[in-house]
Image (cartoon, rainbow, N blue to C red):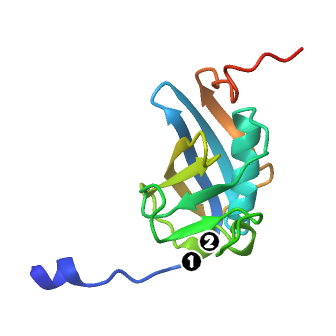
């Protein structure tokens, strides 16, 4: 029984439709559908659109689900890679139920919890994007008044 627990799991690239739940809180989330050939840059772009944020800061995806942990992918404008535009969703070897963290704006640190809700292997994504949503997105700059 112990050998089964310690045995490393084989990494398998899965191609098809990925269903992500991206939550900024339990009462505010968006469901985003992407193809396995999409990049983390594409996921970033959809998150920005889904929450009506301005894409004007550095960001990163932290695959160990901990802020600023080792296994991460950074914004193309960051000084250090690996970079989000160089890795596809399929190359991340994700599994259903897996969680990871997206942090946008390293000053204000907007934390988005990402859960892989479903992977529909072999299913072609005709229209990637936002499928479901719950809650009103917070203002990116709550203390700033636009004239």
What crowding class fits label 2: few (fewer than 14 Cα within 10 Å), some (14-19), or many (20 or more)?
Answer: some
Depth check: give the residue in front, 2 or 76.
Answer: 76
* x and y, in percent, of residue 70 in the image: 46, 71
Depth check: give the residue in front, 40 or 107.
Answer: 107
Depth check: give the residue in front, 139 or 126.
Answer: 139
Residue 90 circle label? 2
Q: Earlier in the sequence, mark 2 or mark 1?
A: 1
Res 47 quadrant in image: top right
Residue under circle 1?
A: 13
23 lies left or right of 74: left
Say which quadrant the N terminus sits in. bottom left
Circles 2, 1 touching at the beta carbon (< 8 Å): yes
60 lies left or right of 1: right
47 lies left or right of 94: right
Residue lying at 46% horizontally and 81% vertically, measured from the top left: 11
In this rendering, is residue 64 above or below 3?
above
In this rendering, is residue 109 above or below 18?
above
Depth check: give the residue in front, 59 or 33.
Answer: 59
């Amino acid at each position: 029984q112990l050998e089964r627990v310690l045995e490393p799991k084989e990494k398998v690239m899965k191609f098809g439709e990925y269903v992500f739940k991206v939550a900024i809180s339990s009462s505010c989330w968006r469901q985003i559908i992407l193809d396995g050939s999409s990049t983390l840059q594409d996921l970033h772009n959809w998150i920005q659109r889904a929450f009506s944020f301005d894409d004007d800061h550095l960001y990163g995806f932290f695959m160990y689900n901990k802020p600023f942990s080792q296994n991460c992918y950074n914004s193309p404008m960051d000084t250090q890679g690996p970079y989000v535009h160089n890795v596809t969703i399929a190359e991340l070897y994700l599994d259903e139920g897996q969680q990871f963290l997206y942090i946008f704006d390293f000053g204000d640190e907007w934390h988005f919890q990402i859960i892989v809700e479903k992977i529909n292997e072999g299913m072609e994504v005709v229209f990637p994007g936002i499928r479901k949503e719950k809650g009103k997105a917070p203002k990116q700059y709550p203390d700033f008044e636009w004239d």
